[in-house]
Image: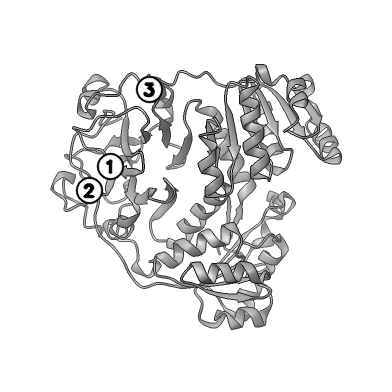
Amino acid sequence: MLLARCMPCSSRGMFPDSRDVGQQGGGAGMKIIICGAGQVGRGIARRLSAEGHDVTVIDMQAELVRTISNDLDVQGLVGHGAHPEMLEQAGAADADMLIAVTHADEVNMVACKVADALFGITTRIARVRAQAYLQKRYQALFSRDNLAVDLVISPEVAVGEMVLDRISCPGAQDVVHFANRRVMTLGVQLDEDCPVTGTPLAQLTELFPDLLAVVVAIRRGQKVFIPHRDDELEPGDFIYIVTNPASARRVLHILGHEEEPARSIIIAGGGNIGRYVAQRVLQDGNRIVSIIEQDVQKARQLALALGEFGERLVVLTGSALNARLLEEAQVQRADLFLALTNDDKVNLLSAMLARQQGAASAMSLVSTLDSARMAEPLGIDSWIDPRAVTVSEILQYARGGFLHRVYPVFDEAGELIEAEALETSPIIGHKLRDADMPDGVRIGLVVRGDELIRATGETEIRPGDVVILFALAEHREQVARLFRVSLEYF
């Protein structure tokens, strides 16, 4: 995600061979005002209120406010989120944080300025979608002396980067980077022909002793759990495995995914995300891209903006649901179809149609949980929730302390977390097998200077270590205590 903060080898083995890793936490909540009750605002409100914060949501649409007030433990107010009297009514005088995620960039930016200038709210976060504001030469716009935005979030760039990460790891349905991209977590669906199913995890470690990788979580049917050394992977399991980029392809091959990188790509949707992905993909001189955009003017702008790539780019005007247009784009020869419009229905149906017409694989944006649940039955190989990406980054910043990244997974039943150990952390100086840790937390890899270490029962966490772990949602507070995150952030 594009974040602008405007403020003055090792142990090896693929699978666990020791008891699980975890601890305990909790604390007082903050008073938080959220401007915008749409999908992103609602997602943030749900998570923050569940963590014990005092949340007030402002939105111009009375129906959205009514729904969020009825469904969540939050206060809802109808009004303009940037107006001083509205913020005052929401309790801005003693608020700790303002999160502005309305559909209007300008409202979000002004709300942050008002929150700082009139009410002295300590932390201000704004979602800014227009790329014109985000050019490096304009970065001073968000400084304390100007708009006073502490954190700028650009969901289009964030989602675009996630799409590119998925493209780089064919066969993975989710790819999340940590520790400045030194560590990655792969979300992988195990097929019936997965060659390592039915084998205890401890035995797999023995089979691949030189592989730096750890399975940290499994979803089997409706159950999400952390595996132990005697557990076996089963066909149909969805797993998250922590590894390093150099090992990613080998891990996928071991799990039965032999897919080759996509060379021929069709993109449905020429908006900010589609254009960003197309430009980045085309910079690899071996790839061919076709873009399908319904808006004639936008299609012309795309053709002009990306004209430097010559014959490797084709821009077609029309609907991605038009079978003849897909045929013209040579969908039957496409390695990958990317549905990146702002309409879930178009994305899901066009991806399904592309698969039916011969595309080797398809990926879709989905902005609601209901849409995501439809993706797999429709034959879509991978999907991305832009709302979840934005919520993840805001949660990370809202919690503060030494949680460097928080990424919800499994419909928010668990989280992938990057955390830094402090001098005072209770886990320091003890072997993990001797620590009093719950079954709901597993440490995958530890980053110590230039070294990557697979966490085992013999591992001792040292001050300054960066730890990549998975935690079930109910153990979130225990992770906080494990790393001694300041309780005021919880």
Q: Which residue is mark 1?
A: 226
Q: Amino acid at mark 1?
A: Ile
Q: Amino acid at mark 2?
A: Asp
User: How much space separates mark 3 and mark 1, taking CA atoms?
Assistant: 21 Å
Percent of width and height locating residue 142 = 65, 62
The reply to whether callout 2 and callout 1 are in contact (CB within 8 Å) is: yes
Percent of width and height locating residue 27 = 33, 70
Q: Residue at x 20, y 41 (%)?
A: 459
Please identify the quadrant where the C terminus is shown.
bottom left
Under circle 2, the secondary element is loop
Name the image quarter holding residue 233: top left
Q: Residues within 10 Å of mark 3 (few under 14, many from 20)?
A: few
The reply to whether residue 123 is in sight is: no
Q: Which residue is mark 2?
A: 439
Q: Which mark lies nearer to you, 3 or 1?
A: 3
Q: Amino acid at mark 3?
A: Glu
Name the image quarter holding residue 33: bottom right
Q: Which residue is mark 3?
A: 192
Under circle 1, the secondary element is loop
The answer to which of 419 and 195 lies nearer the viewer is: 195
Q: Residue at x 39, y 65 (%)?
A: 51
Q: Residues within 10 Å of mark 1 (few under 14, many from 20)?
A: many
The answer to which of 46 and 168 lies nearer the viewer is: 46
In the image, is residue 111 above or below residue 242? below
